[in-house]
Amino acid sequence: MIDELTRELHAQAAFLKDREPVYERMLALFADAIRGEFGTRLIRLWADRTFNSPYERPLLLLAALRYDALWEGSTHPLHQSMSDHSGRVDALTPDAFAAALSPARTRVDEVLRKRAVQTNETTRAVVWLWPAHLLSLVGELRSIALVDLGTSAGLNLVADDLPALWVDEHEVSIPIEPRPPVALRLGLDVSPLDVRRADDALWLRACVWPSDRSRLARLGQAIQAFTARGLRADAPILEACALPDAPSRISSLPDGMFVLGIQTIVRDYLTSDEREKYEAGMRAFLLGRPSRSALVVELEVDPDNLNVPARSATIVFRFASADRTLKQMLMAHTHPHPRQLFINADAVRSFSDAFSPVGT
């Protein structure tokens, strides 16, 4: 495990170069630390865990130390490096790092044993706001059952209460209104977070890079919006459900509602067997619904475009056509944290034609 983790740490450090210098430096220190006592601890802590993505373990290590620093505050040895908006590389000394990894700091071990990285990036909500608008343009009036597959804390389910940030390739705002009404907001996750719990909210902060002020600010707004909506009749419902079991869960949703499912950067967290079961289940779900009553939208990393960050992810629509065949349309390229969409206009026209009731 140590050799494989070393490669992952170096790869993530290369990715973070010039993006988050304090994390780049910290990953190098981790690569040294896992050759000693800390590596022995990690083997024990992760003995019963499975990681499927090459960036999962490095990001979990970083978030664990940031969580501990945020929890303790100014007395933490890495406070000046890891607290919000600080990111001081000069404060990240080998002695401070070693102190932060002391076995006496049991919070770090507990996080590494149980937690998973969950950023709940709300800019990804464009994958339901934009498609819902496209549906309204073709006359879809039914209420939407919005389902977030791999929901984390469910913050994307209330992103319509947050400022709209998205533009097209010409820097023109992407319209997301009008939209059909949302009657149900359902989030499914193997272990959903509850932002009403201070510890879960702190963990979400810990998963955001310390220098990223805009993401931290939007996270705070999203937590407030989710908490406020929790007092309303249309409050989001979060359920513990492993992703491979999600198709079975949503198959019970009423036929009279339009089901809009969204999947944002979850594919890499599944084993090959889990992914196969999930994808087969989603195909069966789409084919089992009445015609033009379900759409699944995926935002996933595009491995062929990683050298162009602004286009390094794709937005793909999946649905069953009127002749009961499955359709897949690449609608746009974007960043994994979407702000700008490079839209495929031909795909938008084809989607509109497929969902238009004219001539059917």
Image (cartoon, rainbow, N blue to C red):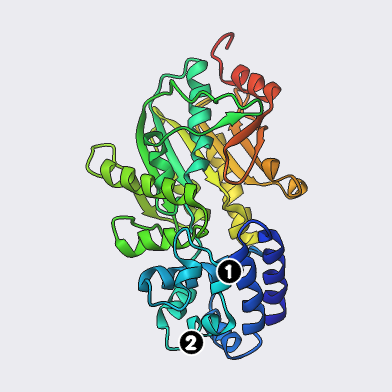
Q: What percent of the width, then of the height, locates residue 317?
A: 61, 34
Quarter containing the N terminus: bottom right
Q: Nearer the viewer, residue 308 or 181?
A: 308
Q: Nearer the viewer, residue 84 or 305?
A: 84
Does residue 43 appear left or right of residue 79 in this picture? Answer: right
**Please, is residue 319 above or below residue 20 in the view?**
above
Q: Label 2 sits on what residue type?
A: Ser
Does residue 73 appear left or right of residue 331 in this picture? Answer: left
Mark nearer the viewer, 1 or 2 = 1
Q: Is label 2 in a helix, a strand or a loop?
A: loop
Does residue 144 appear left or right of residue 26 in this picture? Answer: left
Would you name the residue on which mark 2 appears? Answer: 102
Would you name the residue on which mark 1 appears? Answer: 89
Q: CA distance from mark 1 to mark 2?
A: 20 Å
Q: What percent of the width, then of the height, locates residue 128?
A: 49, 34
Which residue: 54% across, 69% down? 62
Q: Nearer the viewer, residue 312 or 180?
A: 312
Which residue: 60% across, 48% down? 279
Does residue 290 appear left or right of residue 70 in this picture? Answer: right
Could you tell me if residue 301 is visible in this image?
yes
Q: Label 1 sits on what residue type?
A: Val
Q: What percent of the width, then of the height, locates residue 17?
A: 69, 60
Q: In this view, which residue lies farthest toward the top? A: 359
